[in-house]
Image (cartoon, rainbow, N blue to C red):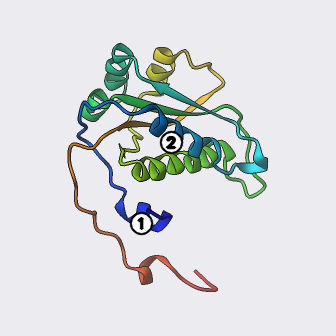
Amino acid sequence: MDVMEAIKARRSIRKFSSRPIEEEKLSAVLEAARLAPSANNAQSWKFIVVRDKEKIKKLQAACGNQKQVGEAPVVIVVCATRHHNMTCGQPAETIDASIAMSFIMLEACEQGLGTCWLGFFYQDKVKEILDIPDDATVVAVTPLGYPDENPAMRPRKSAAEVISFDKF
């Protein structure tokens, strides 16, 4: 599978099998995150891999009781550890962590695994469960596992609606 194939094949998975993830596949997903680009190459992130079933159940509650969190054998929590704005005014930590999360999702797809980018979570509860320090920010959460569903691709806007050349 090449990158474009992974982009086209990736889906938000909300139903996971109980099949455990092989260590080499988990390592490949985490290596993709580690190699993601970041502003000033700061790499100011932390990827928390949660496999403990009790912590996963607590995370499920902290993520609005989304069923897929509790079903997955692994949950990855992406945190930013340094806070600064880039010259353009954008917060580097959110962008950097989001790029890393995208790499996680694409490599997971390559490995035959599913993910679902969660923005619905209570940061204070996630921090408490995982002993995340106050100065870190939880940017994203994803369950990770073998899909137990094969959802169709959701509609996308046409290229003409989202792409322009030389002006807005």
Q: Is residue 44 left or right of residue 112?
A: right
Picture residue at 50% right of the left edge, 79% below the top: 163
Q: Nearer the viewer, residue 142 or 82?
A: 142
Amino acid marked by disc 2: Val
Bin the neighbour count of mark 1 within 10 Å (Cα to Cα): few under 14, some 14-19, many 20 and up.
few
x, y (%) of residue 143? 37, 35
User: Label for residue 126?
Assistant: none
* Quadrant, the C terminus: bottom right
x, y (%) of residue 109? 40, 51
Picture residue at 27% right of the left edge, 63% below the top: 153
> Is 95 above or below relative to 56?
below
| Secondary structure under the numbered disc 2 in the rendered image | helix
Mark earlier in primary sequence (2, 1): 1
Residue under pointer 2: 29
* Quadrant, the N terminus: bottom left
Residue under pointer 1: 5
C-alpha gap between disc 2 and disc 1: 17 Å
